[in-house]
Image (cartoon, rainbow, N blue to C red):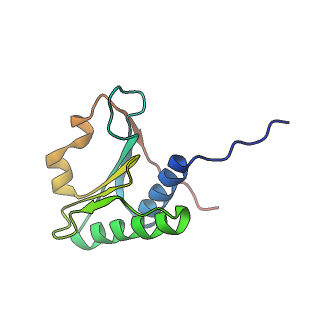
Amino acid sequence: MPRKKAKDTVELLSEAVVEALLDKKAKDPVLLDFRKLDSSLCDSFIICHGTSRTQVEALADGVIRDVKKKTGLNPYHREGFENAEWILIDYADIIVHIFQESKRDFYNLEQLWADAEIVKIESSPKK
């Protein structure tokens, strides 16, 4: 019987980010997968939005806290906490973008990076 391969760090990181976002009720989360593209800066973007400044801040704080707890990783860079219209959390392989809805619509990263594979993230039922 073949041994089950251990999950790699990027997969664990991605799962931790997604779980944190879903836990805080992120709106319309998607993953843009850049791994098949030449000269991409990272493996993926995870993009979502919140309905208020308070929710955007809670989403970002939840990602940072839960990723640290589950993977031991801290972000390399984070910005946007001053006005919480667009918070970026950079984990090198994965960059998390958390918007207020109007800013997400305006910047439209999904269209800007349309050559990436776009994966809609669905919440899974709790076990």
Residue 123 seen: no
Q: Residue at x 27, y 31 (%)?
A: 114
Residue located at (53% from left, 47% from top): 11
Quadrant location of the N terminus in the rendered image: top right
Using the image, determine if residue 108 lies above or below residue 114: below
Task: Between residue 16 and residue 54, name the one nearer to us.
Answer: 16
Residue 78 vs residue 121, the one in the foreground:
78
Q: Is residue 36 visible?
A: yes
- Asked if residue 64 is positioned above or below residue 76 in the image, the reply reads below
Disc tally is 0
Q: Does residue 65 appear to the left or right of 51 in the view shown? A: right
The residue drawn where x is 16% and y is 55% is 102
Residue 116 image position (x, y, % from top left) = 34, 32
**Residue 104 horizontal/vertical position (percent):** 21, 51
Which residue corresponds to the image point at 65% horizontal and 61% vertical from the top-left? 127
Residue 4 shown left or right of residue 54 in the figure: right
